[in-house]
Amino acid sequence: MKIISSFRKAKSSGLWLAQSVFRNHRASNFYPSVSWSRLAASTAILLLAAVAGSAQTLPTEQAATAQSFVNSAGVVTHLTYTDSAYYNNWPTIFNQLEALHIKHIRDGFGWWPQGSPFYSMHQTLLNAGIKTDYVIQWDTTITAPALESFASQVGDMEALEAPNECDVVPNCGGGGLTGIANAIPLLLPLQAAGRALHVPTMGPSYVYPSSYPLTGNISGFINTNSMHLYFGGRNPGSPGWGDLDAEGNSYGSLSFWYDQSQIDAPGIVPTITETGNMSFPTTSTPYTVTESVETAYIQRMLLLAYKHGYERTYFYELIDDPSSPAGYGLLRPDLSEKPAFIGLSNLLNLLSDNGSSFTPASLQYVISGGDSNLNHLLLQKSDGSYWLVLWLEEPSWDPANVAPISVTPENIGIELPSGWTTTTDYQFNSSGTYYAFNQPMKNGWSSLTVTDQLSIVRIAAK
């Protein structure tokens, strides 16, 4: 029997949302753009900064736990698509999910008969520590007891999500206002089941910003809101490319979509349940990217979403399969790994922390140099070490003209109190691998070069 969830849909081309909605370790390879000569060139500037700052008290920044960042990553799967590799090559799919170091997937709820292999697939995921956000199709016969019974059989349910993109015709009985109105009553059985199962419920996802004010206030029914963010080949830190919302944020930006989530669910932290790129080894199609460009964009998307306060980020999707236009998968149709898969896996593995839970502390430090595009995230592990993630949030690709953009590296310095030192710099590259090298300090200062690829500096007590 071929089971197809209503979660399946077709994404439009790379132009979608860009123009139609608004008007307008495993191998640690050497990273060639980082050279010691460039580091030496910045020394004089950094020494001057050290003299100026040495007599001052360094500012303090609160760290987040590294594991909380790792836990913010998820990926969309379509395990119920019996005509795809998700089902027909399940052992490889499971192995790749483990290799990705992601513990959260988003998939579709289904009325599966007793003995269905889908139950054992999800129980295998549960045993590996991977849990599922189940997207509920629009079905007026769904009840809370039915959802509770389903949860007891799969074992891996960690969230219940309202129907997918109900504002798109013909979803949820018609799309538009009809689809939105049809989706809202399903929040009642979802909320009841969620409370009984002690799992959060998510609001319905939308494509169009105009759908949020049409929904009304649903914050009393949900624990998080479901958001779909696609950038059409632009960098994830894009300031946007359309009209401004009431808060002054431009359509397409992370801040814009966060604002929309607060229209129908004020005070509720949103989750990005879909984001990604159409990527290929080479491309001449506008609003798609090359695989080498996608690598850093995927990593930086996760970092920026975490910094913006989104609950979790699910990448669309694990593999290229017939449910969507080609290019969205982190794995190619033959299940080989794209650089973005390797880069995301290495990032999560590097920052994973298997130690006991703890309350992160603050660190006194200063970053000197760099312009407004220099971004950072300060994380801490249970062994007390800090991990400072640095990158330049600049576009390296022109999606309209389908051409690379050169990003100029920037020399910076890190000043630390006497009891702390930088130890290692993990420099990522476009293949998803990284090169680890000693990051020395001199007179309380450490100098390095930052690019649009991630640099992660480990800081430890002396």
Image (cartoon, rainbow, N blue to C red):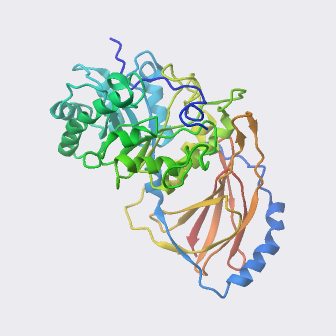
Total of numbered circles in the picture? 0
Residue 415, relative to residue 83: is it above or below? Answer: below
Left or right of 238, for residue 262 = left
x and y percentages locating residue 405 in the rendered image: 76, 43
Residue 162, relative to residue 385: is it above or below? Answer: above
Residue 445, relative to residue 141: is it above or below? Answer: below
x and y percentages locating residue 293 in the rendered image: 68, 40
Left or right of 399, for residue 15 = left
User: Which residue in the rendered view is the most extreme toward the top?
Assistant: 1
Residue 178, relative to residue 233: is it above or below? Answer: above
x and y percentages locating residue 154 in the rendered image: 27, 32
* Residue at the spot 31% in from the left edge and 27% down from the top edge: 137
| Residue 425 sits in quarter | bottom right
User: Which residue in the rendered view is the most extreme toward the left?
Assistant: 145
Q: Can the viewer see residue 6?
A: no
x and y percentages locating residue 462 in the rendered image: 58, 76
* Residue nearest the observer in this picture, 107 or 8: 8
Q: Can the viewer see residue 38?
A: yes
The N terminus appears in which quarter of the rendering? top left
* Residue nearest the observer in this picture, 326 or 22: 22
User: Which residue in the rendered view is the most extreme toward the bottom?
Assistant: 55
* Residue at the spot 41% in from the left edge and 47% down from the top edge: 261
| Residue 357 sits in quarter | bottom left
* Residue at the spot 72% in from the left edge and 28% down from the top edge: 282
Left or right of 438, for residue 382 = left
